[in-house]
Amino acid sequence: MNTISRRRFLAAASALAAPHVLPASALGRDGAAVPSDRIVLGAIGIGPRGTHVLSCMIAEKDVQFVAICDVQRSRREAVKRMADARYGNQDCAAYRDMFELLARPDIDCVLIATGDHWHALASILAAKAGKDVYSEKPCGITIGLCQALDDTIRRTGRVFQAGTQRRSVANFQFAVHLARSGKLGKLHTLHASSYYPRNRHDWLPAQPEPPKDECDWDRWLGPSPWRPYNQEYVRGGWRGHDDFDSGATLLDWCAHTVDLCQWANDADGTAPVEFAPSDHNIVARYANGVKLVIDFLRQPFGDRSPHYRTELGTCPVRFIGEEAWIEVGDSGGIAVGGASTARIEALKAEFALWARASGLDASPHTRDFLNCVRTRALPAANSRVMRSSHIACHAAATAWMLGRTLAFDPAKEEFVGDDAANRMRHRALREPWHI
């Protein structure tokens, strides 16, 4: 029979008698949710923009961020430091392989903010692993990937939010409200700002590959064609390279601005039927006769005149009706015109009732996502919304790259009578990656 000494018994009894102190957050007393009611979050591929979005999420008291995956050690260590500082512990796990993160049954949802070429496949893998997904835009670098992503989200029943956060920002919402409520009169023209498109097919000079734990180059390339390592790629210099970017960089802004025009025209679920490119814009036409103009800006982060009012900020859009027009941008303000003075003042007074916020702030958008993780409702920029607006952008980019007007069938999501354009809807994935 086992025996216990008096000294050991008293020590054990003393330990049992001592109060066990739990942090207030574990009990939900400091405004934090109790552990059983928290949304457990992981992240894959976090750089500058992803860091901002993640900071919005972990600021929420009902979120517990537990794991980061990044193929670059410096980035995963930076995110771990941020998370550990937030929670006052060393609990944030850091992975190089995203499959380790996705295999964790405790993680409810993931933030995906990799390079553009990984967004769709990482989102699809996450959804198949049972995770809800917030993906930075563009969510797919081809029409085919956007279709596959939406199909997967619907089939798996996951909650998906595209990182087109301006759908959750007040001045953009107000502009769409005016367009759809008829307060601008009959809508006839939509303007979406964009960079000048560019497309590179060259390779940067080869450099020695770093150790895999420092930067896993093969995993960074992922489904993209192989090319030799150069540190500029992993520092953000991949932008503009066709293998890694989407639509000749058009979707960097148009994923936002064309998306807002789609919303204003009540065109979620469809797309324009014609795209006509020129050296300064792309003019598209919807079946209802509304015209979409994608304006190329030479200084998108500088002087945006004469197309737009520079003081309204980046990513501006303008909606024009028969009675009035409105222009908005990331500053949070508005400009209205084209109507009587009394009408303009009435519109400004109505806008004064809306909360003003920056178009760059992801907080309302991430909150919308988190709410939908709980309720299983569709978020503002759900996969269906993403699919149609991204396809409209890709169709416009295809017209520009081919240098000719293209007819498009939104129901079939294919170009009419143009085999070359239809082949550009898809790209081969490098082995072993597949959908």
Image (cartoon, rainbow, N blue to C red):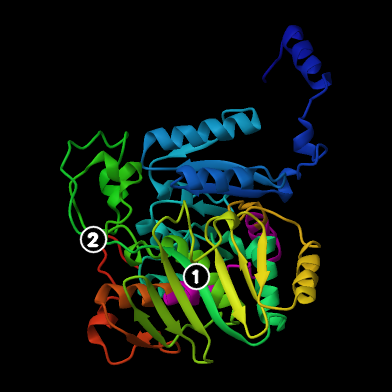
**SS category of the residue bearing label 1:** strand
Q: Residue at x 51, y 34 (%)?
A: 80
- Image quarter of the C terminus: bottom left
Left or right position of 410 against 167: left
Answer above or below: position of 278 versus 66: below
Q: Which residue is mark 1?
A: 192
Q: Is residue 245 magenta?
A: no
- Image quarter of the N terminus: top right
Q: Residue at x 64, y 86 (%)?
A: 322
Answer above or below: position of 368 versus 424: above
Corner quadrant of residue 166 = bottom right
| Residue extent of the magenta highlight | 365-392
**SS category of the residue bearing label 2:** loop
Q: Nearer the viewer, residue 265 or 91?
A: 265
Q: Is residue 383 visible?
A: no
The amino acid at mark 1 is Ala
Q: Which residue is mark 2?
A: 431
The amino acid at mark 2 is Glu
Q: Residue at x 70, y 68 (%)?
A: 174
Q: Residue at x 36, y 70 (%)?
A: 280
Q: Nearer the viewer, mark 2 or mark 1?
A: 1
Q: How many marks?
A: 2
Q: Is residue 353 visible?
A: yes
